[in-house]
Amino acid sequence: MTLGEFSVIARFFSRPVSAGILGVGDDAARLRLPPNTDLVSCKDLLIEGRHFFANVSPDTLGHKALAVNLSDLAAMGAKPLACLLGIGLVTPRADWLAEFADGFYRLADQWQCPLIGGDTIASEFGTVISVTVMGTLPSGELGLRRNRGQIDDDLWVSGDLGGADVALRALQGDVNISPELLAATRARLERPEPRVALGQALLPHAHAAIDISDGLTQDLQHLLKASNCGAEIHWQQLPIHPMIQTLPENIKRLAVLNGGDVYELCFTAPRRSRAAIEQLAIALSVPLSRVGSLTPTPGLRLRHGNGLVESLTAQGFDHFKRGEQHG
Ligand code: ADP
Ligand code: MG
């Protein structure tokens, strides 16, 4: 028996929400904003074949669809409030939907970000998923805006880099890696852990932040442009995924500098925040690496151990430029 639109919603996307919230079931959801907060919102669209493989595990996809949005909230320093899910399916299958919903709700529960509505449609071109996430920031709080970087700020990166890109290239058949290495890097691509707690904890200490979903070089340059300054980063200080250290230099370099799908935060903070940030790394169990600093000279430069300094140009993912990886 094929599932209809309303049974899909009722069976898979109608889990109860807290008292005081009007969730799924009416024409629109309704909830109260906590006093003295501003609403922060964002949306990401994921399309089969472009952002995920048709055969990806549905639990993983449910997780990632929400994770990429929570990562954007984290990069603003916002606290999750609620989310909406738009989904287009060619043929709704109960087992697939049950797993997808489990992956989605598990992460939503983890960050107290209830699913309060959405839309469900038939798609002719494969699965399409669009999640909207809403969050809050205290009114008057500047937030981790891209344009708040200041000259001489330290530049920090959370987590590690390069794993997602290596896994993606391996799954696409572009590079050959061992099954152990694929197993070790695949979670970075498929089950990113959005840095939600870190983003909020950074509010008193950091200036600007961005998540590295389109690659470090490209996303950092967005921040630099908005902040009207440049940066120097040190290759030796970049937190390279430990398992990719032994890969050929060119593959590793591309993965670390340009590889996308990295749901880590790159942020700037004044020198006086160093001790507080190191404490945060311990308190939240999130590795935080100080990788460089902001400079008055525009552009992005990479310094190597031997003193060589090279200029980096933005080369990350762009949806309207063909022949590159997904993003
Ligand atoms: P309308 O036709 O008024 O847009 P729908 O019949 O599409 O309403 O949706 C009925 C209810 O189910 C609404 O509350 C809507 O927000 C919710 N809903 C629909 N699809 C989803 C989904 N994929 N996830 C969560 N809620 C959904
Ligand atoms: Mg509808």
Image: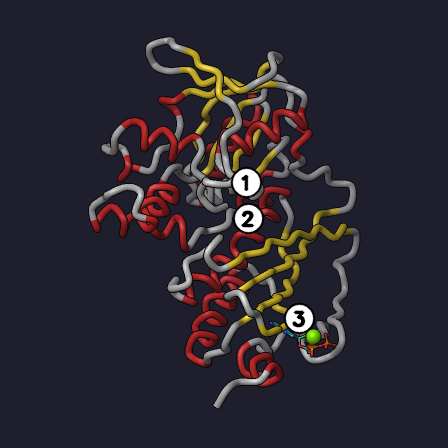
Query: Residue at the location (50% across, 45% down)?
Result: 327
Q: Which residue is mark 3?
A: 117
- Crowding near pointer 3: few (<14 within 10 Å), some, many (20+)? many
Marked residue nearer the N-terminal end (3 or 2) = 2
| 1 and 2 marks in contact (CB < 8 Å) | yes
Q: Which residue is mark 1?
A: 211
Depth order, front residue of 241/169:
169
Most extreme residue toward the top, as rendered? 307
Q: Which residue is mark 2?
A: 71
The span from disc 3 to disc 1 (Cα, nearest Å) is 26 Å
The answer to whether the residue bearing label 3 lies less than 8 angstroms from the nearest atom of ligand 1 is yes
Secondary structure of the residue carrying tag 3 is strand
Q: Amino acid at mark 1?
A: Asp
Secondary structure of the residue carrying tag 2 is helix
| 3 and 1 marks in contact (CB < 8 Å) | no
Marked residue nearer the N-terminal end (3 or 1) = 3
Q: Amino acid at mark 3?
A: Gly
Q: Residue 163: percent from the left, percent from the top?
A: 35, 42
Query: Residue at the location (46% across, 81% down)?
Result: 94
Marked residue nearer the N-terminal end (1 or 2) = 2
Depth order, front residue of 278/187:
187
Q: Amino acid at mark 2?
A: Ser
Q: Residue 92: percent from the left, percent from the top?
A: 50, 78
Q: Residue 183: percent from the left, percent from the top?
A: 27, 52
